[in-house]
Amino acid sequence: MVGQLRPLLLDEACPQAAPCTLNSLIAQFPYIGIRNDGLSAIQFKAGSNWSGFDGNVDNLNIQIAGVLDIYDFEELLNVYVDDDWAGTTIGDDPDGAGPRIPLV
């Protein structure tokens, strides 16, 4: 590619074997951003050619403008299900105040 210009690829700037800091990434790609639309996503990938890989992501920390969100994907120890809760607003305790008692 002598005499031709081409964009620097993210894989070249921050390869998996030598990840970048956020400051380095922004310095190399000053107009980088996160899209904010229905096609946006944060995805996880375990390298390449890992046929049959079975792994987990846990304790994912994303901080934007000083606001930290932590996503904890731990396996649930208790799952509560009751068809009477179908109309319950998300975040409300469906059986009222007090401890939740697991169904045995």
Image (spheres, helix red, strand yellow):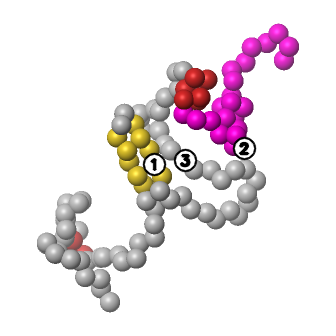
Identity of the residue furthest to the right in this view: 2
Quote the CA–CA distance across marks 1 and 2.
21 Å
Q: Are marks 1 and 3 in contact (CB under 8 Å)?
A: no
Q: Residues within 10 Å of mark 1 (few under 14, many from 20)?
A: few
Decide whether residue 12 is among the magenta residues: yes
- Which amino acid type is marked by label 2? Ala
Comparing marks 1 and 3, which lies closer to the viewer?
A: 1
The secondary structure making up most of the magenta span is: loop
Q: Quadrant of residue 6?
A: top right
Q: Residues within 10 Å of mark 3 (few under 14, many from 20)?
A: few
**Observer-nearest of 55 and 67:** 67
Tag 1's secondary structure? strand
Residue 95 left/right relative to 80: left
* Residue range corresponding to the magenta coloring: 1-22
- Residue 47 sits above or below residue 24 on the image: below
Indicate which disc residue 61 carries.
1
Q: Which residue is mark 3?
A: 43
Residue 15 percent across, percent down from the top left? 70, 38
Indicate which disc residue 17 carries.
2
Quote the CA–CA distance across marks 2 and 3.
19 Å
